[in-house]
Amino acid sequence: MKPAIGTFRVSDDLATLSRACADHLCRMARAASDRVLVALSGGNTPKPMYQLLAEEPVRSQLPWDRVHWILGDERFVPPSNPDSNYGMARAAFLSHVPVPPENVHPVPTEGVTLDEAAEQYEAMLMKLYGGDTLRLDKPLLDLTLLGLGPDGHTASLLPGQPVLQETKRWVAPVPHGRPQPRVSLTYPALDSSRVVAFLVAGEEKREMLDEIWSGDTSVPAGRIRPVGEVIWFVDKAAAGRWA
């Protein structure tokens, strides 16, 4: 079987899934001749993959000076808060590798309002991109890592929230839908990706994944349509009948 969008790579478990995704990122970064922009995902699933980036053999193979790291979404909490996506990525790998500080771009969450955080992050992305209009022949992101919630959300594109209807802004505030307000890349920004890589593990994701792979576009993750390709890195527990 083939999913409605993209291709899937099924691994036995989260450990082998993480290795497959880390290897893909490493190959992609090494093959690029210019700067590589990677959007990181939060949550528990990508953490083992991040840890692999700080370990050999991946650590010494990544061209750290050319890879820039942004956040696909962020909870509006300080980096020291346990719920911070940036804090998790920093602890998992960013603080253990030779990445230039100017290549790491956390969402501002201190001394600003939620709206200001979204505006400043969008301005930063436009500066990195070199313009304020996304072009089909020039994707914003080289690799976008995304997760999948049991309710079908990805990044902080939460079911029933206005951010799902945003068609112009690259970054938007998400004040409701979860206990903590969030800042998230929007569909225009996420879809401006050479590769979108979903990391999905666990039996609790199986039903939602099956719906999306069967063509359901009513949930947020099912609406991702990048200019490039979609790769689903999943374990057997999540893949179910598709394994």
Image (tube, helix red, strand yellow):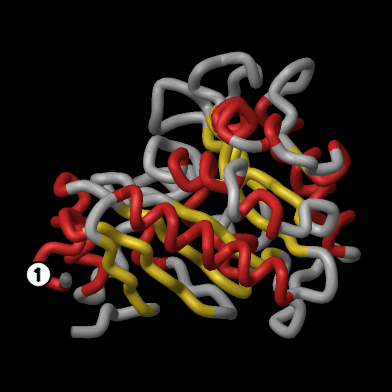
Give coordinates of residue 226: x percent, y percent. 54, 74
Q: Residue 54: name its quadrant.
A: top right
Please, what is the three-letter code of the amino acid marked with disc 1? Arg
**Badge 1 density bin: few <14, some 14–19, many ≥20, Cα 10 Å:** few
Q: Which residue is mark 1?
A: 241
The residue at 52%/46% (across/down) is 52
Residue farthest front in this picture: 57
Residue 236: % across, % down? 18, 60
| Image vertical order of residue 106 relative to residue 166, above or below | above
Residue sitting at the far left: 241
Q: Secondary structure at mark 1?
A: helix
Q: Which quadrant does the C terminus fall into?
A: bottom left
Front residue of 100/165: it is 100
| Nearer to me, 45 or 152 | 45
Q: Please identify the quarter of the rendering in which residue 77 is found.
A: top right
Residue 162: tell me if it is visible: no
Q: Identify the residue shown where x is 26% and y is 46%.
A: 151
Answer left or right for 111 relative to 187. right
Q: Residue at x 66, y 27 (%)?
A: 114
Relative to 210, residue 78 above or below = above
